[in-house]
Image (tube, rainbow, N blue to C red):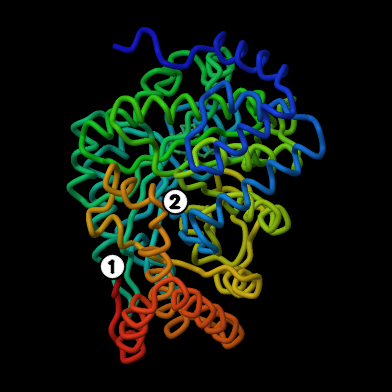
Amino acid sequence: MYREDFIKDEEIFKLLEEGKKASKDEIRDIISKSLSKERLEPIETAKLLQVEDEILIEEIFEAAKKLKEEIYGNRIVFFAPLYIGNKCINNCVYCGFRRDNKAIVRKTLTKEELIEQVKILEGKGHKRLILVYGEHPDYDGDFIAETMKIVYSTKNGNGEIRRVNINAAPLDVEDYRKLKDAGIGTFQIFQETYHHDTYKKLHPNGDRKSDFAWRLYGLDRAMEAGIDDVGIGALFGLFDWKYEVMGLLMHAIHLEEAFGVGPHTISVPRIEPALNTDYPQEGKYLVSDEDFKKLVAIIRLSVPYTGLILTARESAEIRREVLPLGVSQIDAGSRIGIGGYEEEDYIPDKEQFQLGDMRSLDSVINELSKEGYITSFCTACYRSGRTGEDFMSVAKPGLIQDFCIPNAILTFKEYLLDYATEATVESGNKIIEEELEKLERIDPKLRSIVEEKLRLVEAGQRDLYL
Ligand code: SAM
Ligand code: SF4
């Protein structure tokens, strides 16, 4: 079906070569274009990727921070991953769940176990989940839709899941429609690597996953089925990181051109050690912390309006450093072993790889509050129909703050009332007060609307949003 695809390896290499010739003035012009909130062209991103000059790199970091502040404010959206099943028919060499890995215990959550896991997550304050699946005939559209429905209908006191995102193998249009009907938020597919030869090497011939184009166009099919929030990503460490950033940008542009709207999010997983899996230790393309910071900042500058997700694969220290460079969503308190939310620690024989940040949701929120970030569990956009192109029309003029900050305040207040420790209540309420003062300066009427709703939340109402 897709004989030729929109990722042209030679063209990317050529752009990266061309990028090396950029002058300092050109780089500064590109940074200014990005600060005017325009999406960059591939050659411009290629030029940023080739910057070696320390002063210019610092300017890229500063610009990324400024852009994040202007578009997203100091808001961080929290979610948690929930692994549903680790059976897999593929043999991706870097993944602990690969078919031939006999050290892994195969397990799919039963309905009762799924309910139990969701209740634990709700009991900690989560409102947004991403459900994760291996690729297996058991995990088809009907099964995924069924698990989504179970998640949405599971309640625990005031706890409920209001947005379910999915990370699973690419589906066909008919199966995507089932997920759309079950109320999916975002469907995520990571291309792993955009470099055709590397993709071929890491995904053995004959495996379902060896079909590069089926995966590459997986989100086109999701869009065709009416799922208009889609997430892309590359697994950094498989091939040259500069090439992968170009691939992500090409993918974003393709979706923009084909559907009038780019991806809702970009994920930047770095490869992690996995049980009985040598590949990560051998990879010559492993990305250093310094390069990782650069790639996050350059993605931020290249696609100003696309959310950026940084997972708990990364250590607490790296997350602290990278967050200000453009990240808008993180997970916390995550456990990725199947059934892992009952355990306190690792369960290596049921995990896909090892997490770097095992802190609890509450301790991450407390730390971020003290650093001036406001936590958000908001799910309003997707439930008010502000997705895809509609989301962009809200996002583009910089109105994120008008909706997102008030909704962050309201959902954070719920968290503080229902789940937070005393220390987090203190740091969190301080941030809410600061945010209300900021709102007052921008729009006093908006402040009183939010304060009115806050009173209702304090009186026991839940799920209020603009
Ligand atoms: N099995 C489906 C697939 O491959 O599309 C669903 C996603 S898989 C469970 C989730 C993602 O984990 C993969 O797309 C890959 O990017 C990432 N992953 C695999 N092995 C990893 C590792 N060793 N370290 C970090 N991330 C890894
Ligand atoms: Fe299976 Fe996905 Fe792991 Fe590949 S990355 S082995 S498809 S779970």
Where residue 392 appears, as percent x and y from the top left, is 34, 45
Q: Residue at x 63, y 48 (%)?
A: 354
In which quadrant of the rendered image does the C terminus lie?
bottom left
Q: For residue 380, which quarter of the picture?
A: bottom left
Residue 123 placement (x, y as % from top left): 42, 75
The residue at 69%/33% (across/down) is 280
Question: Of 457 and 35, which appears nearest the observer?
Answer: 35
According to the image, label 1 marks what residue?
Answer: 154
Residue 163 lies, in percent from the top left, at: 32, 58
Dot 1 or dot 2: first in sequence order is 2
At label 1, which amino acid type do we have?
Thr
Between 328 and 173, which is closer to the camera in this rendering?
Answer: 328
Q: Amino acid at mark 2?
A: Tyr
Disc 2 target residue: 83
Quadrant for the N terminus in the image: top left
Q: Secondary structure at mark 2?
A: strand
Q: Quick check: 386 above or below 300?
A: below
Q: Answer with left or right where residue 17 lies relative to residue 227.
A: right
Cβ of mark 2 under 8 A from ligand 1 = yes
